[in-house]
Amino acid sequence: MLDTTHNLPRGTICIEDLEIGMTRSLTKVVTDRDIELFAEVSSDRNPVHLDEAYAQDTMFQGRIAHGMLTAGLISAVIGEQLPGHGTVYLGQSLKFMAPVRPGDQVTAEVRVLAIDHAKRRVTLETWASVGKTVVLKGEALVLAPSRKFD
């Protein structure tokens, strides 16, 4: 499967250059290794993520990735692309819509909804999808980097 995680522009878009509607994304195939590493780092070893036999008997009928692993892809878009390096996360709402399974190709996307230049705050619409299925949606509030102050 295609993994374009490293093929997108990285860096910083300062608040002075942001515009309503700007969008950035990344695409990544979620692997068994990703799930295992996330379980190790987060200490979330729920067997629905790690044990296929256990997971078969759940409502998901098979293993799924941690929801926060998928949310981490949103964080990557914000921290690497929009606004990018120097951005400070202030808040994030999340609604998990559908499971992500090992081997799924996930696209995480971010769109600028509002800009408060006086406070350097940017509201972002956030979502992730597998194919045409939205698996996560939410909204982020960030402190954007500025050429005037950073």
Image: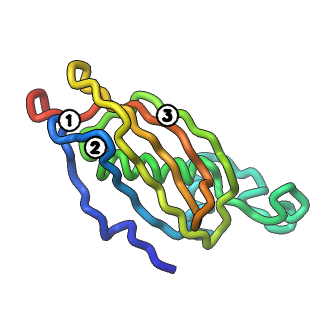
Please report whichever mark, 3 or 1, sits nearer to the chain's N-terminal start. Answer: 1
Q: Residues within 10 Å of mark 3 (few under 14, many from 20)?
A: some
User: Quadrant location of the C terminus?
Assistant: top left
Label ID, residue 56? none
The residue depicted at 56 percent of the width and 59 percent of the height is: 129
Task: Tell me where residue 134 sits by quadrant.
Answer: bottom right
What percent of the width, then of the height, locates residue 72? 49, 49
Residue 16 is left or right of residue 142, and the answer is left
Is label 2 in a helix, a strand or a loop? loop
Q: Which residue is mark 2?
A: 83
Q: Amino acid at mark 3?
A: Gln
Q: Amino acid at mark 1?
A: Ile
> Among all residues in the image, which is located at the extreme right?
57
Residue 47 is left or right of residue 150, and the answer is right
Do the numbered discs 3 and 1 sit on residues whose CB atoms are within 8 Å?
Answer: no
Do the numbered discs 1 and 2 sit on residues whose CB atoms are within 8 Å?
Answer: yes
Q: Which residue is mark 3?
A: 92
Please report whichever mark, 3 or 2, sits nearer to the chain's N-terminal start. Answer: 2
Q: Amino acid at mark 2?
A: Pro
